[in-house]
Image: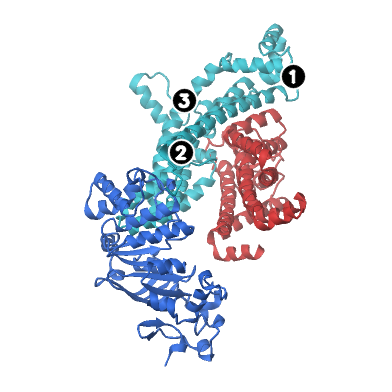
Chain colours: A blue, B cyan, C red
Amino acid sequence: MLDIQNVSVKFSSASEVGAVEDVSLTLQKGTKTALIGETGSGKSVLLLAVMKLLPATAEISGSVLLEGTDLLSLSEEELETIRGDRISYIPQGGGNGLNPLMRIGMQIGEPLIDHRGYSKKKAIAQSVELLRRFRLGKEETWVRAYPHMLSGGMRQRAMIAMGIAAGSRVILADEPTKGLDQDRIQGVAECFQYLQGETLLCVTHDVNFAASVGEYISVMYAAQQLEYAKKEAFFEHPLHPYSRAILDAMPERGLKSNIGFAPPHDAYSVKGCRFSDRCPYKNKLCDEKKPPFIDVKGHKVRCWQYAD
Amino acid sequence: MLFPFRGFERDLSMKRKIILNRLLISLGTIFLIVTISFILVNLMPGDPLVNIMGDDQYYRVKYSDPELLEEIAKKYGLDGSLGERYVKYLGNILRLDFGFSFTRNRSVLDIVLYRLRWTLVLAVPATILSALFGALLGIRAGWYQNGLLDRIMTPLTLVLNTIPTNCTAILFLTLFSYKLRLFPISGMASGGLTGGAYIRDVMWHMCLPLSVMVLSRTCSNFIHMKSYVIQVKGEEYILTAVAKGVPKTKVLFRHVLKNALLPYVTILCMQFGHIVSGSVMIEVVFSWVGMGNVMNTAISASDFPIMQMCFLLTAVCMVVSSILADVLYVLLDPRIKEV
Amino acid sequence: MIKNIWKEFRKNRAFRLGVILLLFFISMAVLAPVIAPYDPEALLGMPNQRPSAAHWLGTNDIGQDIFSELVYGSRISLKVGIVAALAVTTLGSTIGMVAGYYKGVVDKVFTVLTNVAMTIPSLPLTILLVGFLKTGMLGMVVAICITAWAGTARVVRAKVLQIRELPYIQIEKLMGVSDFKVLFKHIVPNIADIVMTRCALSVGGAMMTETSLSFLGLGSFTQKSWGNILHFAFYRNGVINNMWWWYLPPILCISGCMLGFVLVTHYGRSRSQLIKG
């Protein structure tokens, strides 16, 4: 369905390090993938790069195939017909992702107006149905509300509804749980369960949320993808030392490790593995050479331990 | 229900409360300004009567007609205590009695209101035109940031903004009136005309002062509008709209414009407050005998009653326009902000 | 700080132009006795002369050398601008700091006061005050001070309100460190940037007001500022007779100086935005 191949993003050609380096991800139709990473790991930039939403100063290389069409090679006009129609982006609910001066119904129905030629009235009526799918309650009232009247969790639901409004089959969600407390996160996770048949790529820093939403898990660290596996495989036997560290640091698993997680500033410029300076298993090779993305029986990992 | 329902009804009543609150504050402000004006006249060193009438008139009247002086003193309650004087002063203002100008031998209210008309003839079209120009140019320059218009207009407005209006006015006067002889040198109308010819003549006289005013205001409007558009353009909801596949022009008209016009309307309202006081310099240079010019001559002639009324009028104008801005903001913006 | 300014100076063309303009006018003011060929107040015989080798910008209606007037005028204009700006900034930031730091009733009173001060039209009030005070330059500075403090106070208050909630300041307060010490040890250094930007902005604003007032003939007549020269050029027929050497130079000086301040403060503004973001 969506095939991200060797995508790299650089914000200035002068610097050697990129915001995203050589990420490949294949999303099968109807699957849900969670992309775990810390702030600054490049996961959100990747999402924007896939939809070509980054400012003109960003240099994107690689290709993003949506059912065979390379999105990165399309013109802005061609992209306008695809965005929101065949692939859509859901911004963070905690942020300023909804126009404060436009009613919710109109914002949800907007893709229908632009892609399906709906009238305004019909689009708003449809948005009531869309909201109903996410069990908002009092949908007829809420479509007339302005974004500031909604709580963070409700905004997130409205935005998911907006994403699928025009029948888009591929959904990219950016940090849906940011700024929400535990109860609301549960609610948002449920919303993603309601998505049946849509292909989802969800960026998050919340491992629990990733576990409840994703069928596949991918981990990013300092602009690179470190691991990719099926959910069960990832949680039962994570391969990368970093993945193990974040799983061990979860309270549910007894807070067994605490290595501090934000990558150090100079991590981006090291020659070898970017995780090497905090890795308990590192050897000389890790410092010298960048590890390849190794395929261990369908479970991919970027670490020298698994090289032959 | 999980979340507290912050309904529309509550929002509405809150808005009503905020507007009422602003109205009360404005009334208080006007009262304070009136009081400041009283303090200026009465607590300044020297005889308050001298302050009310101004040096020259005081001594003229004192030698020519001492009885009139007593009459005036009585009218302002100068024989009584400070409190009594204050009450009398407030009463006079409530009755719109701003006193008598001894330099012009007419009631202050008549003089100022008559002159105010001429100022408005100049300032109202200037405000409207510059609001339009500023918005159109600013939106374009902000939307196509670093485009041709932006690269020309931004440094140009920056430089023009640093030239005081009286300097621009003098430059326009020398260039267009003296050098090119395109427009009249000064004044508001040639004598002896009536009807349509008179109106055309006034408009011809208006050209230069109006264009100076429009130029200077368009500059600041442009800078504001451009920065609002750029700011809104960077907001996350604009990214959302683009990600939804909304076409570029519709992003501008549906999402950017309304959000950028909101603060713009506010500064326009505030500008409306300067409508009577903002044209002093231009009026003086072009001998346009409006409020500003009257105020200027009143000061050189120490005619305090006129000065006082000009001051009160401009202040009230500012208060009214700021309340207008507040009310408009509350009406246009669904969000409620307590300031 | 100095290093930052130098970096900006090398990188930013607009900032560089601003600094150069300001340095030009400041050196003009400082070196006035050296530069000016004549005493600006001396009556040198022939009035209304055209520019010549002896009088670069001619003479005015009573035979004073206009170039010398202009050079000495930079002293008056800059002095009024800087003194007024310092006074305005001191007054405004003190009020803003106290209001922001103590909150409560003090802050409420302050908010009402600033709102009033912001709505009072500054030019008419300044004109009125100058009309009353009648003491030339001092009156002007006082009038500017009374009418212009509110903007600075508002900005400073907002920043102080932000800073005082920072954990380390709350902790110091809980530990019983005196308010005075907290204010000067933590708050003042944190608002220094904003205050300096506001100050530079106020110099420009004050010079603008001074020019307007002097142009209307409300300045001091013994010491002529640029606005004053323009006043005489306008009222003594310099403009009507198209004596460009009389009215144009003060206009250029005023505008150039204002431009200098605007360009330099643009740097300050972008810096404070950096701090905010």
Image label count: 3
The disc, 3 or 2, on the residue closer to the chain's N-terminal end is 3
Do dots 1 and 2 share one subunit? yes
Task: In the rendered view, tell whether residue A232 sits above or below residue C63.
Answer: below
Residue underneath mark 2? B329
Q: Residues within 10 Å of mark 3 (few under 14, many from 20)?
A: some
Task: In the rendered view, tell whether residue C176 sits above or below residue C76.
Answer: below
Of residues C151 and A219, the one nearer the viewer is A219
- Point out the frontmost of discs 3 and 1: 1
Q: Is residue C138 left or right of residue A306?
A: right
Image quadrant where one finds the N terminus of chain C = bottom right
Label 3 chain ID: B
Q: In which quarter of the view is residue C177 placed?
A: bottom right
Give how far across and how far down residue A121 sits, in percent.
25, 44
The disc, 1 or 2, on the residue closer to the chain's N-terminal end is 1
> SS for tag 2?
helix
Q: Is residue C20 left or right of residue B236?
A: right
Amino acid type at image mark 3 = Trp
The disc, 3 or 1, on the residue closer to the chain's N-terminal end is 1
Residue underneath mark 3? B118
Whole-angstrom CA distance, mark 1 to mark 2, is: 46 Å
